[in-house]
Image (cartoon, helix red, strand yellow):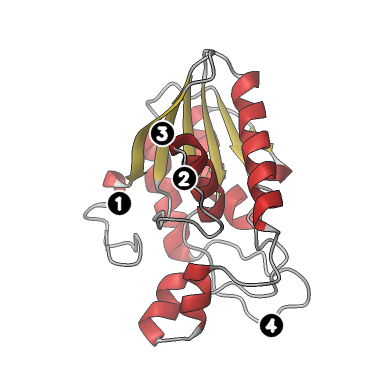
C-alpha cells in the first residue's frame, strides 16, 4: 500500500489564548489546501485520516470532498504541541528575528515527551497501515508527526520537531508492504504550489 503523509496548510497566528491555541487555517492556507486537493483528486486514495487539530481537519476537508470520502479523525496523530497556548507560523518567527524561532526548530520544553510522542505516532500509523492492506491512505497531520514517522522508516533518531522541515501541504509518500518493509518514495512534494504565489516554507515561495 501507499501511505501519503500530508502536512496541514498555513494556519492563523494565535497567541496568549485561554487553553490550546488550535488555530484555523489562514486565507492562504485554505488556498493551499484547495490546490493540494486538486493535485490528488485523480489518485486512487481509499481513505483520508486527519489529526483532530483544526488546522489539519480544515486541510483535509477539500481533499475528502474531491475524493468523495469521509475524514477519519485519529487522535494519535495530533502534534506534540497540541496543548500550547500559542501558534505562530515559523516563517513569521524567522522573518521577524523572533527568538522563539530557535525554540521552534530545536524543540521546547512543556510539550509531549519525545519518546512517548514517537511511540504514539508510530503505533498509530502502523495501525492505520494494517487496516488498509492493498489500499492507498492519506493522513493529514503535522510536521513533528511526519518527521517522526519518516525518521522511523529510514532508521534515524529524531526528536520533535525533527530532522527536516516539511512545507505546508507537502506530501510525503511511503510504500508499506505486507511483510513489514517501509520505503520512503517522496519527500516534501509540493509541485502543485509552484507559480501560485502562496507560501511554501522557510526558503521557498509558490
User: Label 3 near label 1: C-beta < 8 Å?
Assistant: no
Q: Distance between the residues labelled 1 and 2?
A: 29 Å
Q: Which of marks 1 and 4 is nearer the N terminus?
A: 4
**Relative to residue 17, is residue 9 drawn left or right?**
left
In the rendered image, which residue does mark 1 sit on? Answer: 193
Q: Which residue is drawn at 27% across and 58% down?
A: 206
Question: Can the viewer see residue 164 in this picture?
Answer: yes
Q: Nearer the viewer, residue 107 or 89?
A: 107
Give residue 156's mark: 2
**Relative to residue 22, is residue 167 drawn left or right?**
left
Eye-nearest disc, 2 or 3: 2
* Helix, strand or loop under label 3: strand
Q: Distance between the residues labelled 1 and 3?
A: 17 Å
User: Label 3 near label 2: C-beta < 8 Å?
Assistant: no
Eye-nearest disc, 1 or 4: 4
* Helix, strand or loop under label 1: helix
Q: Earlier in the sequence, mark 3 or mark 4?
A: 4
Q: How far apart are marks 2 and 4 (CA)?
A: 35 Å
Eye-nearest disc, 1 or 3: 3
Q: Distance between the residues labelled 1 and 4?
A: 31 Å
Eye-nearest disc, 3 or 4: 3
Q: How crowded is mark 1: few (under 14 residues within 10 Å), some or many (20 or more)?
A: many
Give residue 173's mark: 3
Q: How far apart are marks 3 and 4 (CA)?
A: 36 Å
Q: Earlier in the sequence, mark 1 or mark 3?
A: 3
The vertical placement of 49 against 133, above or below, is: below
The vertical placement of 176 against 124, above or below, is: above
Give residue 16's mark: 4
* Helix, strand or loop under label 4: loop
Q: Earlier in the sequence, mark 1 or mark 2?
A: 2
Amino acid at each position: 500500500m501507499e501511505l501519503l503523509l500530508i502536512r496541514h496548510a498555513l494556519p492563523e497566528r494565535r497567541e496568549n489564548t485561554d487553553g490550546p491555541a488550535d488555530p484555523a487555517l489562514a486565507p492562504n492556507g485554505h488556498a493551499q489546501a484547495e490546490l493540494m486537493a486538486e493535485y490528488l483528486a485523480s489518485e486512487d486514495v481509499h481513505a483520508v485520516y486527519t489529526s483532530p487539530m483544526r488546522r489539519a481537519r480544515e486541510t483535509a476537508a477539500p481533499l475528502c470532498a474531491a475524493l468523495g470520502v469521509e475524514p477519519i479523525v485519529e487522535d494519535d496523530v495530533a502534534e506534540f504541541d497540541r496543548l500550547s497556548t500559542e501558534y505562530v507560523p515559523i516563517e513569521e518567527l524567522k522573518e521577524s528575528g523572533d527568538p522563539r524561532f530557535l525554540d521552534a526548530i530545536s524543540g521546547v520544553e512543556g510539550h509531549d515527551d519525545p519518546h512517548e510522542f514517537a511511540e504514539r505516532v508510530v503505533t498509530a500509523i502502523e495501525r492505520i497501515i494494517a487496516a488498509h492492506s492493498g489500499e492507498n491512505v492519506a493522513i493529514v497531520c503535522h510536521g513533528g508527526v511526519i518527521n517522526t514517522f519518516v525518521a522511523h522508516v529510514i532508521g534515524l533518531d529524531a526528536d520533535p520537531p525533527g530532522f527536516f522541515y516539511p512545507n505546508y501541504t507537502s506530501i510525503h509518500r511511503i510504500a508499506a508492504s505486507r511483510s513489514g518493509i517501509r520505503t520512503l518514495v517522496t519527500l516534501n512534494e509540493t509541485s502543485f504550489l509552484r507559480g501560485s504565489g502562496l507560501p511554501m516554507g522557510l526558503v521557498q515561495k509558490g
